[in-house]
Amino acid sequence: MLIRTTPTIPTREITDERLYLDRRAFLRASVGVAAGGVAGALLPTDEAFAQAAIPNVKKSNLSTTGEKLNAFEDITSYNNFYEFGTDKGDPKANSGRFKPTPWTVKIDGEVGKPGDYTLEDLLKRFPLEERVYRLRCVEAWSMVIPWVGFPLGDLLKVVEPTSKARFVEFTTVQRPAEMPGLRYPVLEWPYREGLRLDEAQHPLTLMAVGLYGKTLLNQNGAPLRLVVPWKYGFKSIKSIARIRLTEKQPQTSWNMSAAQEYGFYSNVNPQVDHPRWSQAKERRIGEFLRRDTLMLNGYADQVAALYKGMDLKKNY
Ligand code: MTE
C-alpha cells in the first residue's frame, strides 16, 4: 500500500453537527418516505443521489461512544478507492461519472438461495441502523465515522449458506469507463476481499449504505460497501457487485499484490508491524499528536473469541 509521509489533511473547523442535523435534509427525507417508503427515498432519480438523507435510521447500541466524530468533509475527501486513483483526493475528484444506481449484487457460491439482489430489495428487507465505528487504515491513520447500514449477517441468513460454506468473497464492480484508476495495474482488478464466514456473520460486520445520515458518496463506496471495524480499512471493500460464499479461502487484491505485507486476516494489531512501518500508533485525521493503536482497533472484547488459539503473528 502506498504510504504518505506528509499529512495532507488540514484540521478543519467544520461543524459536522450542523450538516448532520440539517433540518431541510430530514424534511426532504420525510417527503421521500411518503412517496415511496425507505427504498424509494434512498433511490432518488434526481441528480443528488449522494445528498439523499436516509429516513428511519435507528441508533445502534453497537456504536462506539465517547469519541469525537470526524468531519463529513474529511470522511468524504480523504479516501482510498484506487479504482479512482491512488492519491487521497482522487476518489472525490474522479468519481463524478460513477453511477451507483440502479445497483444489483450477485450472491452465489455455497448458498441455498443464490440470486441477483437489487439495492431496493435489500433496503426493503433490512432495517437500517446508525453505527459509529473507528476505521483504522493500514497506513496508520484513523477516523471515527457514523455509518448507516445493516448487519451483513442478516443478509447471509436470507441466502442460506450451505454446510460447505466457510468463507465469503466480495468483489467490487469493474467499470473502466466510470473508474479511471482501473487503467493502472496498481492492484489486481477487480478489487477483491474476503472474510471467514464467522467473521462475516459477526454482529459488528456492517453493510453500509450511508454515513452522517445520508446515502454514501461515490468516493466512500456508493451505494453499498462493507465495514469491518476491527480490521485494517482495506478489508472494508467498496461498491460491492458480488458476494460469493466459498469452501476455500478466497484470494484478496492486496494479498495478491504483496503477500508478505497484507495477510488474509489483516486484524488491527499494534504488536505486529507492517514490514515497512510500525502499527503501534496512528494519527487520527484532524488531530496533531499520534495515539496508541488498540488491539483489534478497540473491539477486542467483542471479537477476540473469533481468534482463540490462533497465532496472530502468523495469521497477520
Ligand atoms: N475498496 C475498493 N474497491 N478499492 C479500494 O481501493 N480501499 C480500501 C477500502 N476499500 C479500497 C476499498 C482502503 S485501503 C481503505 S483504508 C478504506 O476503503 C477507506 O475507506 P474510506 O475512503 O471510505 O475511508
Image (cartoon, rainbow, N blue to C red):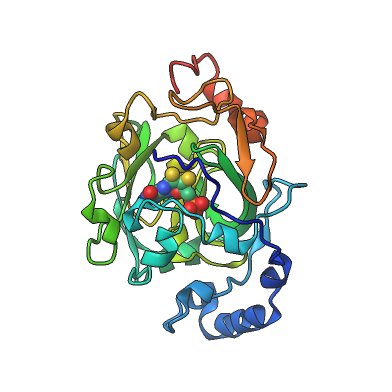
Tell me the residue at 41%/60% (across/down). 91
Q: Quadrant of the C terminus?
A: top left
Tell me the residue at 53%/75% (across/down). 51
Q: Indicate the position of residue 253 as horizontal and vertical percent values.
A: 31, 39
Q: Quadrant of the N terminus?
A: top left
Residue 52 position (above or below residue 116): below
Q: Indicate the position of residue 247 as horizontal and vertical percent values.
A: 30, 30
On screen, residue 256 versus residue 167, left or right, reads left
The residue closer to the viewer here, 217 or 203, is 217
Q: How many marks?
A: 0
Residue 91 position (above or below residue 291): below
The residue closer to the viewer here, 255 or 169, is 255
On screen, residue 190 versus residue 150, left or right, reads left
Q: Quadrant of residue 251?
A: top left
Tell me the residue at 62%/41% (across/down). 283
Q: Indicate the position of residue 231 as horizontal and vertical percent values.
A: 51, 36
The residue closer to the viewer here, 79 or 228, is 79
Q: Quadrant of residue 296?
A: top right
Tell me the residue at 61%/66% (across/down). 213
Q: Quadrant of residue 294?
A: top right
The residue closer to the viewer here, 202 or 76, is 76
Q: Is residue 111 visible?
A: no
Q: Is residue 200 visible?
A: yes
